[in-house]
Amino acid sequence: MTANEAVLEMRYSGIPEEDIEAILDACKKKGITPQNIDQELEKRGLDKVFEFEYDASESWYDQNSAASHKAPAKQGLEKDKK
């Protein structure tokens, strides 16, 4: 992720400019990654911006998508219920 991409994402999310500058300064030392930016945002009491980009992985999706897309159990016809 470039610094410009990070700035655009934070601006789009409504992060104040002074916080964006401070976050970028802190992240330049540790690395400009979604995780580091979100950590800095949380330190300032702000919401994460990038959490969905690094929390969602294919393996998680593959495991849960099968379970959540099961066909509903078939119920008997009304005449069978008598």
Image (tube, helix red, strand yellow):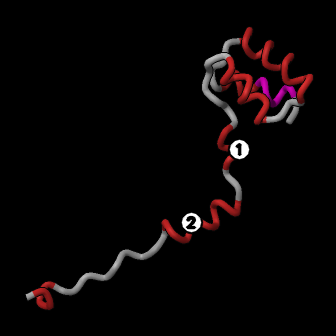
| Left-right relation of 70 to 28 | left
**Which class describes the residues within 10 Å of circle 2: few (<14), some (14-19), or many (20+)?**
few
Residue closest to the far left: 82
Front in this rendered view, residue 7 or 27 = 27
**What type is the residue that disc 2 sits on?**
Ser
In this rendering, the answer to whether 74 lies above or below 20 is below
Whether the magenta-drawn stretch holds residue 78 is answered as: no
**Position of the C terminus by quadrant:** bottom left
Q: Residues within 10 Å of mark 1 (few under 14, many from 20)?
A: few
Q: Earlier in the sequence, mark 2 or mark 1?
A: 1
Residue 51 falls in image quadrant: top right
Tell me which corner region of the image, top left, top right, bottom left or bottom right, holds residue 61: bottom right
Residue at position x 56%, y 66% from top?
A: 65
- In the image, residue 44 lies at what x, y percent? 67, 16
Magenta residues span 3-7
**Position of the N terminus by quadrant:** top right
What separation in Å lies between label 2 and label 1 (alpha carbons)?
18 Å
Which residue matches tag 1? 53
Please report the residue visible at 66 percent of the width from the left and 31 percent of the height from the top: 49
**Disc 2, SS:** helix
- 82 above or below 15? below
Question: Which amino acid, by three-letter code, is at mark 1?
Answer: Glu
Question: Residue at left 67%, top 51%?
Answer: 56
Whether residue 77 sits left or right of residue 18 in the image: it is left
Magenta: main secondary structure equals helix
Image check: 47 left or right of 34?
left
Total labels drawn: 2
Residue marked by disc 2: 65
Residue occupying the point 66% across, 24% down: 42
Give percent across and percent down for residue 15: 66, 18
**Residue 66 screen position, x and y as percent:** 55, 71
Q: Residue furthest right?
A: 29
